[in-house]
Image (cartoon, grey):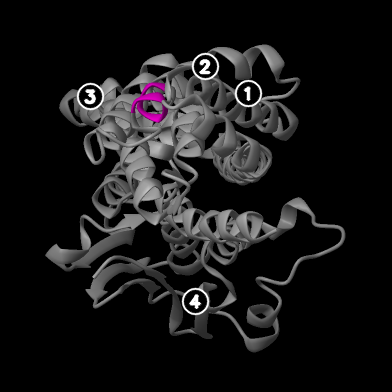
Amino acid sequence: MGLFLDLFERLGLFAILFIFLIRFKAFKRLLTGIASRRDKLVLAFMFGGAGIMATYSGFAFHGAIANLRGMAVALAGILGGPLVGLAAGLVAGIHRYAIDPAGLTSLSCGIATVLQGVVAAWLYPRLRRVEYDIFAAFAVGAVNEILKMALILLLAKPFSSALHLVAILAFPSILVNGLGNAVFVQLISTVFREQQLAKAEIRALQAQINPHFLFNAISTIISYTRTDPAIATNLLVKLAEFFRNSTATTEREVPLSVELQHCEAYLAIEQARFEERVRIHYQIDEAALDCPVPPLILQPLVENGIRHGILPRDAGGDITIQARKEQQNLHIRVADNGVGMDQAKLSGLLTPRQHPTGKEGLGIALKNVNARLVALYGRKRALRIESTPGAGTTISFSIPVAA
């Protein structure tokens, strides 16, 4: 019973490490099938390093080290395929042999570790019924530990000591490694579903591109072809850039500089349409440009300010886009000096309606932006909207970033 508890304790420590590991973008790219060779190499060494940590966090037991090293290597094979599994196995396996070459199980465990990543990569796809199958993962972990026990019996000397060790260690080691594989594959499945949901949200936003904007943009470009072909050419480039940015991205986050380029492409077209009625001011801190933000998060706020703030005024107005990084927060603010709105309209702007109508205009877009911020960062990161009739509207939000 004590052996089970000790291994489960190590499983908890490994869980903390694994949760840290899945935060890396290379890991997330691996889940979506877009990982580069460099990503896979980095992850192989990370999983190999996790195997080394598992060795050091293990405990001496009858001349061996009881640990969860095989689980780390197996996960490398399950996620990255045979080459990633092999590389992780080599890192962890060579280390296991090197720290105690004369040990009872050093050679057998070193060889087993190298093989376990490859076995996992080969066996898991043949057993799984769904993309992330916890039962197949458990079976892989069990088979890998049975392989290790067999190599201990085959290579460790004297045989009587090897047999005694296997008799005590085999069952708890097989069970805990199998359960560990199943638990972490389930965790990976959760991360994968979150990524797919985030991509679905982005695709939904991409599908909401206003057809009236496209029609008006094309009409504006056509009119300039007669009066100023150079401007028409530039606007056509901006329109292509706007739609490329709107439809191409599937990343969960992009640098603020990329999001600002998307806004600038949109604003170039709107300023060509409305000329001096739309005036844009940027107040962007240099340190804010590299900060990651959700894609397609800023342009709807700017469009809201133009359509519902300044264009209803005969004289037009000003849009001010501000961004500043302050310690571990990025603060973004979009303000207009347009017609504003009363408290009754303001209070219902972000409130979901059971039967929304097309008359809500960009209220739908604001609700979507707000919902994404809340889903990604929590309710404290929701949009803040302030407005005064006749004086304008300010929409702001902040998101956490690295210091």
Q: CA distance from mark 1 to mark 3?
A: 64 Å
The residue tagged 2 is 119
Callout 2 secondary element = helix
Q: Which residues are magenta?
A: 107-111
Instruction: Name the residue nearer the viewer: 279 or 187.
Output: 187
Which quadrant holds residue 245?
Answer: top left
The residue tagged 4 is 339
Q: Neighbour class for label 1 at 10 Å: few (<14), some, many (≥20)?
A: some
The residue tagged 3 is 233
Instruction: Name the residue nearer the viewer: 97 or 300.
Output: 97
Task: Decide: is 330 above or below 74.
Answer: below
Q: Is residue 110 magenta?
A: yes
Which quadrant holds residue 256?
Answer: bottom left
Task: Name the disc covering residue 167, or none.
Answer: none
Which of the marked residues, 2 or 1, is nearer the chain's N terminus? 2
> Is the C terminus in the top left, top right, bottom left or bottom right quadrant?
bottom left
What amino acid is found at the position of numbered circle 2 in the picture?
Answer: Val
Q: Are marks 2 and 1 in contact (CB under 8 Å)?
A: yes
Q: x and y percent of residue 279 in the render? A: 27, 62
Residue at image coords 57%, 30%: 163
Which of the marked residues, 1 or 3, is nearer the chain's N terminus? 1
What amino acid is found at the position of numbered circle 4 in the picture?
Answer: Val
The residue tagged 1 is 143
Q: Is residue 228 magenta?
A: no
Residue at image coords 37%, 19%: 86
Query: Which residue, as the protein is rendered here, is positioned at the far left?
Result: 286
Q: CA distance from mark 2 to mark 3?
A: 58 Å
- Position of residue 330 in the picture relative to residue 346 (left or right): left
Which of the marked residues, 4 or 2, is nearer the chain's N terminus? 2
